[in-house]
């Protein structure tokens, strides 16, 4: 996937956490869907105008301009939403009354299950470079079962595949 909704090399986006990168990828998917839908609408309009011998009219140019304008507005909305999500997540990642959020000492229950998956996976990847010890430690982690829900088995299978 090519990320072009934001410039990941700019200082504003260069130091994103795995959770924030997941948010960027989700926003990029939304943008790609908007672009694809706009292209589809433009092509359908062109074929319709060609079929009716009106392809050279200014109506086609104006209609394509409106589709482009709507596409750009929708992309800007997705980008603004991403910026708000990243800012909110950065605030929420600081912690609560128990201290900063860190798995397993103070897990962040405000995260979605897929974001929790990324946090726990990153924790176990950082703990040790030995894949067998990593899998054994994860298998003994009782917090991970409830914290990850149905993603527990997925992460277990992923860690097992490294062995």
Image (cartoon, grey):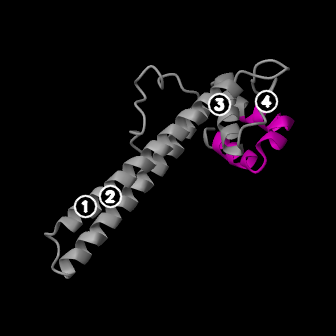
Q: Earlier in the sequence, mark 2 or mark 3?
A: 2
Q: Is residue 140 magenta?
A: yes
Stretch in magenta? 135-160
Whether residue 70 is situated above or below residue 158 in the rendered picture: below
Which circle marks residue 43 in the picture? Answer: none
Number of other residues with Cα within 10 Å of mark 2, as a class: few under 14, some 14 to 19, many 20 or more? few
Q: Is the residue under label 1 in contact with that under label 2 (CB below 8 Å)?
A: yes
Q: Which residue is mark 3?
A: 89
- Residue 92 in percent (x, y) is at 71, 27
Q: Quadrant of residue 120?
A: top right
Q: Is residue 52 magenta?
A: no
Which circle marks residue 62 in the picture? Answer: 1
Which circle marks residue 107 in the picture? Answer: 4
Instruction: Tell me if I can see residue 128 in this picture.
Output: no
Residue located 85% across and 20% down the image: 98
Residue located 60% across and 28% down the image: 87
Q: Label 2, label 3: how many angstroms apart (C-alpha)? A: 34 Å
């Amino acid at each position: 996937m090519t990320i072009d909704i934001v410039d990941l090399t700019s200082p504003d986006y260069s130091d994103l956490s795995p959770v924030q990168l997941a948010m960027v990828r989700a926003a990029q998917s939304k943008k790609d869907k908007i672009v694809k839908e706009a292209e589809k609408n433009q092509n359908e309009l062109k074929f319709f105008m060609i079929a009716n011998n009106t392809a050279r009219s200014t109506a086609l140019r104006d209609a394509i301009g409106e589709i482009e304008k709507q596409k750009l507005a929708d992309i800007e909305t997705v980008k603004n939403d991403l910026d708000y999500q990243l800012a909110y997540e950065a605030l929420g990642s600081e912690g609560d009354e128990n201290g900063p959020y860190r798995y397993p000492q103070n897990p962040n229950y405000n995260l979605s299950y897929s974001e929790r998956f990324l946090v726990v996976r990153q924790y176990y990847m950082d703990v040790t470079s030995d894949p067998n010890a990593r899998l054994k430690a994860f298998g003994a982690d009782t917090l991970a079962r409830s914290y990850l829900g149905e993603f527990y088995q997925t992460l277990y299978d992923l860690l097992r595949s490294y062995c």
